[in-house]
Amino acid sequence: MYLHASHMLWDYAAGALVLAEAGGAMSTFEDDDFFAGGPWSKSVLAGRDAGLFAQWRRYVRARLRSARARAAKARRAAPRRSKRA
């Protein structure tokens, strides 16, 4: 299993080919199709075993959704600062 965020195109191109040839799978944190979207900065979830990869992807995405929800709640609860002239 492999997990990383903010890779650039040259960071994952060769690895994607090797993984595909070995029968592995990869996705981003948000999308099952790794190659969908822009190529310049991506998160990477990758694994050789399809079952383990699917479990890992569900786990990571659930934690990411939870963290984003907590951050949004904290932003809403934070006191608003008034602008000074």
Image (tube, helix red, strand yellow):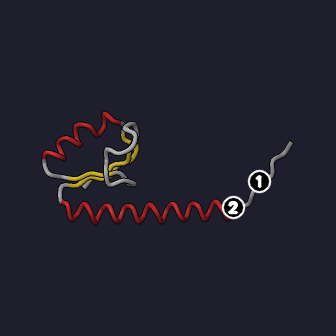
Image height of 22 relative to 11, above or below: below
Image height of 73 relative to 12, above or below: below
Quarter of the image with the C terminus in it? top right
In this picture, residue 72 sits left or right of residue 67: right
In the structure shown, which secondary structural element does the residue marked by tag 2 occupy? loop
Amino acid on which the number 2 mark rests in the picture: Ala
Quarter of the image with the N terminus in it? bottom left
Label drawn at residue 78:
2
Residue 57: quadrant of the picture: bottom left
Q: Which residue is mark 1?
A: 81
Amino acid on which the number 1 mark rests in the picture: Arg
Q: Residue at x 39, y 36 (%)?
A: 40
In this picture, residue 64 sits left or right of residue 14: right
Label drawn at residue 47:
none
Picture coordinates of residue 12, whole percent (x, y): 28, 40
In this picture, residue 32 sits left or right of residue 6: left
